[in-house]
Amino acid sequence: IDSNYYNANLGNKYSLYFNFLRDKIKEYNIKPYYMYNMDKKGCLIGIVSRLKRVFSRRMAEKAAERARERKAYRLREFLTLLACYYANRSSLPLGLIYAAIKGAIRLS
């Protein structure tokens, strides 16, 4: 596997790729404002630590019941951030994508 990575990471292969790319850009007369790079980054937001408390048995049972209910809603969500930059260095506004609860649509 390491040799595959090494062979794919050779300078002449990068040169061939970018020469091919440059030729196609010239051939089709593609303007910089039609070229962009879209990058997607994700992060997981959730509970990092828990506090320990002393409860009565009744309160502990209620807390366990609430915890089971919250588990259905998931205490963590995966967020995706989309950034889009054009070749002329302008950019689109950032986009944020995250899961909706019970099929509801949320806009950010």
Image (spheres, grey):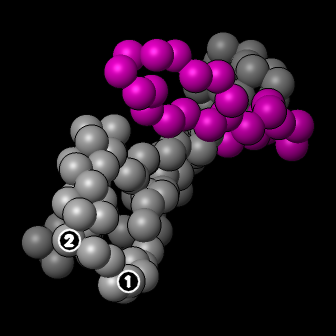
Could you tell me which secondary element the residue under label 1 belongs to?
loop
- Lateral position of residue 82 relative to residue 74, left or right: right
Query: Does residue 82 sit above or below 102 in this rendering?
Result: below
State the residue position of label 1: 53
Taking depth in this image into account, of 61 and 95 the one nearest to the observer is 61
| Res 20 seen here | no
Q: Residue at x 66, y 14 (%)?
A: 28
Q: Residue at x 79, y 31 (%)?
A: 92
Magenta residue span: 83-108
Which quarter of the figure is the C terminus placed in? top right
Residue depth check, mark 1 versus mark 2: number of the one nearer the observer: 2
Q: Residue at x 73, y 38 (%)?
A: 94
Q: Residue at x 30, y 49 (%)?
A: 66
- Lateral position of residue 76 relative to residue 45, left or right: left
Point out residue 26 in the picture as x, y percentages from the top left corner. Answer: 70, 24
Which residue is the extreme one toward the left?
A: 1
Label 2 is placed on what type of residue? Arg
Query: Does residue 32 sit above or below 61 in this rendering?
Result: above
Could you tell me which secondary element the residue under label 2 belongs to?
helix
Check residue 92 for magenta coloring: yes
State the residue position of label 2: 57
**Tag shown at residue 99:** none
